[in-house]
Amino acid sequence: MRVTVVGCAGTFPSATSPASSYLVEADDDAGRTWHVLLDLGNGALGPLQQYCDPAELDLVGLSHLHPDHVADVSGLFVYLKYHPSGQAGPIEIIGPFGTASRLGEAYGLEPGQDMTPQFNVSVWQPGRPVRIGPLELFPTAVEHPVPAYAVRVIGPSEADPARQVTFVYSGDSDACDALDQAARNADVLLCEASFLEGRDDDVRGIHLTGRRAGETATRAGVRMLVLTHIPAWNDPADALAEARTVYGGPLGLASPGLVIPL
Ligand SMILES: [Zn+2]
Ligand SMILES: [Zn+2]
């Protein structure tokens, strides 16, 4: 399994990165590569095309329905619907309750229209894994002002396909037991760190700080922590420094194009 950071800017695109989007890929025993995209925020459909043909996505998993995580699904729909081959899609889309209607409203569907056959839209069922090729996705509801999920992905190791490895994406969340559980013993936790200690202490239930991301990783026994979803008005070095005070393992920052082999 390998994860490519397509976009990692928090809350809105930055001058140098689209908003959240992460491409998770793994090869099966027959050599077919499976492509799972976690989130497709503002601007991410552009650089996604550097890494795979969007029509070849097997599944798009949406952590929640804020625009910095789903805005470019409208563009993906256009890409499939009007593709010159005439045969693009369907792509499986999974998100919180209400995903199909929200995506339709964002695109501007007329009454009586829907997004089939380009998309098959379904809803995360906590406790029910989603199997796609050699990958298994486990959604966990986490703490954010709207229904939101962390996603735990288990799949074959790049170096030793006989071994299973675990990648966890926090989505957007404040610290909570559910996120600790989702991240338990992960090989890599890709964790949001939108807020700053001292500046945002009065705002709870929305986002993590670098420190709270680091504490989550320590409590969960995570082997490597990668911070993401840092808004353009923050200095990423601050998030990194906060996390470093409470997490002793390998620690990094997401950046567009970063590939994380697991
Ligand atoms: Zn966000
Ligand atoms: Zn959000």
Image (cartoon, grey):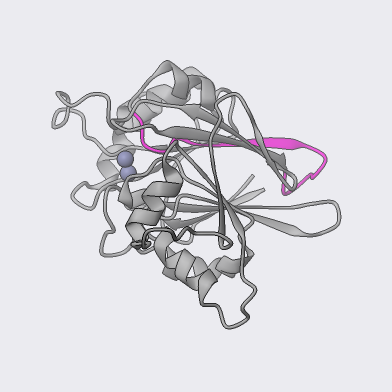
Give the magenta range: 157-173
Q: How many numbered discs sit on the rendered protein?
A: 0
Taking the magenta stretch, the answer to whether it contains residue 165 is yes
Q: Residue at x 62, y 61 (%)?
A: 90
Give the farthest residue toward the right: 30
Q: Please say if 176 is above or below 199.
A: above
Q: Position of residue 18 (x, y in %)?
A: 35, 60
Residue 60 in view: yes
For this orientation, the residue located farthest to the bottom is 84
Is residue 97 toward the left or the right of residue 1 in the image? left
Which residue is pictured at 27% across the width and 24% down the height? 205
Residue 72: percent from the left, percent from the top? 39, 61
Image coordinates of residue 25 in percent, x first then y, are 64, 53
Q: Is residue 38 above or below residue 165?
A: below
Farthest residue in the front direction? 112
Q: Is residue 223 left or right of residue 190?
A: right
Q: Is residue 52 visible?
A: no
Q: Quadrant of the C terminus?
A: top right
- In percent of the image, x 20 and y 29: which residue is there? 197
- Magenta stretch, main secondary structure class: loop
Residue 27 position in % (x across, y down):
75, 54
Please tell me whether residue 40 belongs to the stretch shown in magenta: no
Answer with left or right where residue 261 lies relative to residue 200: right
Identify which residue, 65 or 254, lies in the foreground.
Answer: 65
Q: Viewer-proximal residue, 178 or 231?
A: 178
Quadrant assignment for ligand 2: top left
Residue visible at 44% across and 61% down in the picture:
113
